[in-house]
Image (cartoon, rainbow, N blue to C red):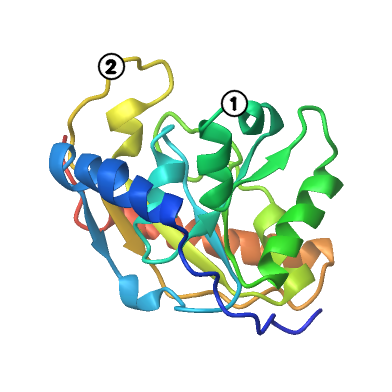
Amino acid sequence: MSSAPLAQAPKPSLAYRLVSELLVFPLFRGLFRGSTRGLHHVPKQGAVVVVSNHGSHFDPPLLGHALGRPVAFMAKAELFSIPLLGAVIRACGAYPVRRGGSDREAIRTATARLMEGWATGVFLDGTRQPDGRVNAPQPGAALLAARSGAPLLPVAIVNSHRALGTGQVVPRLVPLQLRVGEPVPAPASRRRADLDATTAILQQRINALLELDPLHP
């Protein structure tokens, strides 16, 4: 396993700050009465793999702007060719992944972001879940941590599946909350048994965070 990267976290760009202050926070704090818990667990600098449940299209901007530091995410390559949108998402740390591209290419790109000191976001199931829980976790986040030596940060996004879940077109104004847990060390190796063991820990931690003091719609 590689040692943890020592690069400092990139400073938030002007585009990132504008998106946070003019779009994400007014929606999160105002319309959805959003709140955060456990921000003291977020490393202020250096690489970290931010691992979350996934219930809504709201999740990437929430996770990318509510932790106090930018979080890099994969995004479809086509989005980067759209005027203005491409520049904004690139400035916010998104990186392109080609449709039909290999998982290895995506892993290499994400690892490069970690080596630059980024917080890199991964949804543990890889796709939205109707109940907002972690149900079928994939080993990608653990593999990134094993490759880079970066710790993993479990985050639970509460109620986003109720706000704009699968099949919904009109958002519901339910309260949202991000709950951050204690970091989990990188797996001891890239062996599947070690990756699966760390992935199981992340699933348990995130689902446990979801079950604390439920927020009612």
Quadrant of the image containing the N terminus: bottom right
Task: Identify the residue under disc 1.
Answer: 82
Between 125 and 31, the one lying in front of the other is 31
| Count of labels in the image | 2
Q: What residue type is disc 1 on?
A: Ile
Other-residue count near label 1 (Cα within 10 Å), few / some / many at <14 / 14–19 / ≥20: few
State left or right for residue 158 relative to residue 216. right
**What secondary structure is marked by label 1?**
loop
Q: Is residue 144 above or below residue 186?
A: above
Closer to the observer: label 2 or label 1?
A: 1
Residue at position x 43%, y 75% in the image:
182
Residue 179 showing in the rendered view: yes
Residue at position x 33%, y 38% in the image:
160
Position of residue 138 measured from the top left corner of the image (x, y, whole percent): 67, 48
Q: Is residue 52 above or below residue 191?
A: above
**What secondary structure is marked by label 2?**
loop
State left or right for residue 4 relative to residue 134. right
Task: Identify the residue under disc 2.
Answer: 170
> CA separation, marks 2 and 1?
24 Å
Between 205 and 67, the one lying in front of the other is 67
Q: Earlier in the sequence, mark 2 or mark 1?
A: 1
Position of residue 29 measured from the top left corner of the image (x, y, whole percent): 18, 48
Residue at position x 44%, y 50% in the image:
15
Position of residue 162 measured from the top left corner of the image (x, y, whole percent): 29, 30
State left or right for residue 172 relative to residue 16. left
Q: Are marks 2 and 1 in contact (CB under 8 Å)?
A: no
